[in-house]
């Protein structure tokens, strides 16, 4: 029955119908808001951590790097579960009353994205530091000044790390589903809406959201590639 | 004046192996010093110990005056350039050292090595030879009393090598103490006033250039000179 209905819809009509749907844009805006907030927080926390691990030597450093790299593949549902347990009424952060709010989704995605940004930053800074360390020390540049110089010099690599985080955050469904609850108009984002609409049978909306989501992820990656390429040409 | 530099009983070990093994020497102002030796003799490590980039396992590196870091510079085998313009790289070094009117001084240094025309170009897209000249300009702009050069031409073609050597000669003539490592006998002859021959982390011989090449007194140096002659 469904494929028949879909078959009758002409593509143009379908696109128009989908794009005219105010629900769609509300969902898109909330999705981007949640993911961008999470990536911003994860960047502020993860970059200094990644950079610090890159340039310092301490016992257990290698284990931390392995764990950090492994956490890049953290399953979103597991993150969702842990954040759910923490934020639920009986959990340690239950008194904040954040469960099933956009804030809870931001927290979950921050946890998900933080290892990605920290690990990619660690790798980029470590490579750059290996190259620059002697030269900077020879010039008498130390500590924070040296760190700022290196971070500024590899800013385009770091941008790639941030965009990787954003791609991950905007595409995941497990974590936001569990801690957000997919409440219509409150915590429904693109991925959870796609899951729901598909199971309900509202395939046009699901497809529309899917296309928007893919367009966003594609645009992010194209942007990252172009920025990196332009930087390579401009700065070598 | 930060010279003379006194190095006493210097040892540097890594992984249980002594890379520099009980080296004592004085570096005086004036004649340019070439540290000569085969690959793995410890030339780079000795330079880094003197420049203060490596901490010795034992022994001492003593400069005549306090604050010697500011009055020495080093050019590495492979130039390390920041992702900014050629001029920006020199300005960065000057500003880090607290030099006033950094842009003007930097432009002068670029002109000195013949790179004024590429001042605004990104440093990393310059050719290998140009990058090494830029590294020399960056070091020179700081007006160091001592300039360490760690095999500065080993990655370059003959033309670029000649250009680099001319710049080094000009710095030498201007009164900067040159301490350069190389494994090229020809380069040692062209640029050196005296040779410190390093073999397996020890000084096998130290002699003025005009005596070293005709009649090296140590068997190691004799073998090295003889072995290299066909290509020198």
Image (cartoon, helix red, strand yellow):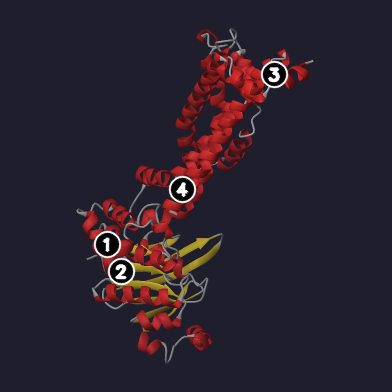
Residue picked out by circle 3: A203
Whole-percent x and y of residue B198? 46, 76
Q: Evaluate whether residue B116 shows in this view.
A: yes
Cα separation, mark 3 vs mark 2, equals 68 Å
- Quarter containing the C terminus of chain A: bottom left
Percent of width and height locating residue B127: 43, 65
| Image height of B223 relative to B135, above or below | below
What secondary structure is found at the residue carrying circle 3? helix
**Residue annotated with mark 2:** B113
Nearest to N terminus: mark 1 or mark 2: 2
Q: Residues within 10 Å of mark 1 (few under 14, many from 20)?
A: many
Q: Residue at x 31, y 64 (%)?
A: B117
> Which residue in the protein does label 1 denote?
B141
**What's the CA distance linking mark 3 and mark 1?**
68 Å
Query: Image check: A74 left or right of B210?
Result: right
Reading the image, the residue beneath label 4 is A230
Secondary element type, mark 2: loop
Both labels 2 and 4 in a single chain: no
> Which residue sits at x=53%, y=35%?
A220
Mark 3 or 1: in front is 3
Assign a secondary structure to mark 1: helix
- Callout 4: few (<14), some (14-19), or many (20+) C-alpha neighbours within 10 Å? few
Of tags 2 and 4, which is closer to the observer? Answer: 4
Report the mark closest to the observer, 3 or 2: 3
Q: Nearer the viewer, mark 3 or mark 4?
A: 3
**Chain designation of label 4:** A
Q: Chain of mark 3?
A: A
B156 above or below B82?
below
Position of residue A85 in the picture relative to residue A220 (left or right): right
Q: Are marks 2 and 4 in contact (CB under 8 Å)?
A: no
Question: In which quadrant of the rendered view does residue B119 lie?
Answer: bottom left
Residue A86, image x, y percentages: 58, 15
């Amino acid at each position: 029955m469904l494929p028949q209905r879909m078959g009758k819809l002409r593509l143009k009509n379908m696109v128009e119908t989908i794009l005219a749907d105010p629900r769609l844009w509300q969902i898109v805006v909330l999705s981007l808001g949640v993911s961008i907030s999470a990536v911003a927080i994860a960047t502020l926390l993860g970059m200094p951590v990644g950079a610090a691990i890159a340039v310092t030597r301490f016992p257990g450093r290698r284990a931390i790097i392995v764990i950090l790299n492994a956490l890049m593949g953290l399953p979103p549902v597991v993150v969702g579960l842990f954040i759910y347990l923490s934020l639920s009424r009986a959990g340690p952060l239950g008194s904040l009353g954040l469960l099933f709010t956009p804030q809870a989704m931001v927290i979950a995605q921050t946890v998900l994205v933080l290892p990605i940004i920290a690990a990619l930053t660690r790798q980029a800074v470590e490579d750059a530091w290996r190259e620059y360390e002697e030269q900077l020390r020879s010039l008498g540049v130390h500590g924070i000044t040296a760190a700022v110089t290196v971070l500024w010099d590899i800013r385009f690599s770091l941008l790639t790390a941030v965009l990787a985080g954003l791609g991950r955050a905007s595409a995941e469904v497990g974590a936001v589903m569990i801690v957000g609850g997919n409440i219509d108009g409150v915590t429904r984002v693109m991925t959870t809406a796609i899951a729901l609409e598909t199971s309900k049978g509202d395939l046009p909306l699901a497809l529309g959201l899917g296309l928007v989501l893919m367009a966003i992820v594609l645009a992010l990656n194209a942007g990252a590639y172009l920025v990196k390429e332009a930087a390579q040409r401009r700065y070598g | 004046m930060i010279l003379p530099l006194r190095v006493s009983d210097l040892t540097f070990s890594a992984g249980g192996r002594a890379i520099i093994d009980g080296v004592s020497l004085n570096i005086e102002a004036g004649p340019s010093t070439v540290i000569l030796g085969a690959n793995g003799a410890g030339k780079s490590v000795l330079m880094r110990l003197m420049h203060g980039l490596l901490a010795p396992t034992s022994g001492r590196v003593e400069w005549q005056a306090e604050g010697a870091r500011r009055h020495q510079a080093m050019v590495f085998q492979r130039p390390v350039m920041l992702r900014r313009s050629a001029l920006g790289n020199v300005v960065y070094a000057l500003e880090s050292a607290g030099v006033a009117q950094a842009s003007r001084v930097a432009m002068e240094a670029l002109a000195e090595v013949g790179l004024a025309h590429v001042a605004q170009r990104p440093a990393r897209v310059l050719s290998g030879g140009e990058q090494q000249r830029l590294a020399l300009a960056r070091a020179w702009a700081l007006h160091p009393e001592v300039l360490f050069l760690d095999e500065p031409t080993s990655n370059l073609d003959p033309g670029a090598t000649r250009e680099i050597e001319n710049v080094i000669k000009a710095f030498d003539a201007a009164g900067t103490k040159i301490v350069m490592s190389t494994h090229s006998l020809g380069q040692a002859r062209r640029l050196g006033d005296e040779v410190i021959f390093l073999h397996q982390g020890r000084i096998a011989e130290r002699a003025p250039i005009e005596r070293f090449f005709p009649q090296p007194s140590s068997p190691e140096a004799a073998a090295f000179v003889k072995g290299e002659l066909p290509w020198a």
